Image: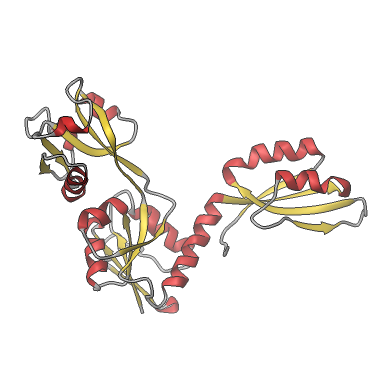
Amino acid sequence: MLRIAVPNKGTLSETATSMLHEAGYATRRDQKELIVADPRNDVEFFYLRPRDIATYVGSGALDVGITGRDLLLDSHSAALEVDVLDFGSSTFRFAGPIGRFENLRDLEGVRVATSYDTLVRDFLAAEGVNATVVRLDGAVESAVRLGVADAVADVVETGSTLRKQGLEIFGPVILESSAVLIAGRDDVPGLDTLRRRIQGVIVAHQYVLIDYDLPADLVDQATAVTPGLESPTVSPLRDTGWVAVRVMVPRSDMNQVMDELYAVGARAILVSAIHAARI
């Protein structure tokens, strides 16, 4: 039985659980459930603190898990990143009082507060910067104002939270993180099936199906707009001068593609959601 670790709370939890549900697995109905067995799919889910998941998987206590790349690297776990998932993106940057720091070298000999002390310490060491890393659990942007640190290293989205604390971003990106699927080893029985199912959900989120009718002599022009993943499906219609085309296109492009198809001469253009896929 494949043993899978799932975040029990935080920003990764809801999306990870929803993705597994869409992939056909049983998921918990009560937030207090810590273990969910799914004998039909020969898997068992363990809902754990996101920060602990890499440790459990890396030690072999569990087979695979969903966590953040930041948490995986910060743990120094032996777990392997086997797939990047389509959610939980974040960027880690340094920030300090406005005008005080210009580049990474300015951190030499100062205190840097962060919730990811191992990750930041490794980054600074690799860059040859000797700084004191102060570990805090959350709200690190207040550390400078409260005198605990001289600078911070934290997740940055718009930077508005940092600016409210009188801080500005400086220096290089520490890490581009996202949710990842991790495993103790890459040959765990059942891992390939899990990966295919999850990737099927990701594809279903990223793509739509477009169907349209088209004069047969315009197929080359239209399929240049919609080449598909491999090749569009082109089927004859009762009217021999027309064909029906079906193709996958990126969801983000669908309206632009419909406009271009209409301009080429396509008609009866329909868009359908994809609920699952195997690519």
Tell me the quarter of the image containing the N terminus: bottom left
109 or 30, which lies in front?
109
Note whether residue 172 is visible.
yes
Residue 94, quarter of the rendered image: top left
Percent coordinates x, y for residue 59 in the rendering: 22, 70
Name the residue at 38% across, 65% down: 27
Depicted 263 relative to depicted 178: above or below: above
Percent coordinates x, y for residue 173 in the rendering: 30, 38
Residue 127, quarter of the rendered image: top left
Depicted 174 relative to depicted 31: above or below: above
The number of callouts visible is 0
Name the residue at 39% across, 53% down: 15
Name the residue at 59% across, 47% down: 250
Q: Tell which residue pokes out farthest to the right in this image.
A: 240
Depicted 29 relative to depicted 130: above or below: below
Residue 28 is left or right of residue 122, and the answer is right
Depicted 214 relative to depicted 49: above or below: above
Residue 135, quarter of the rendered image: top left
Residue 179 is left or right of residue 49, and the answer is right
Instruction: Specify how the rendered protein is coloured.
Output: secondary structure
239 or 124, which lies in front?
124
Residue 65 is left or right of residue 117, and the answer is right
Tell me the quarter of the image containing the C terminus: bottom right
Percent coordinates x, y for residue 255 in the rendering: 65, 38
Q: Tell which residue pokes out farthest to the front in this image.
A: 128
Note whether residue 38 is visible.
no
Name the residue at 18% across, 32% down: 105
Q: Tell which residue pokes out farthest to the top in this image.
A: 99
Percent coordinates x, y for residue 198 in the rendering: 46, 62
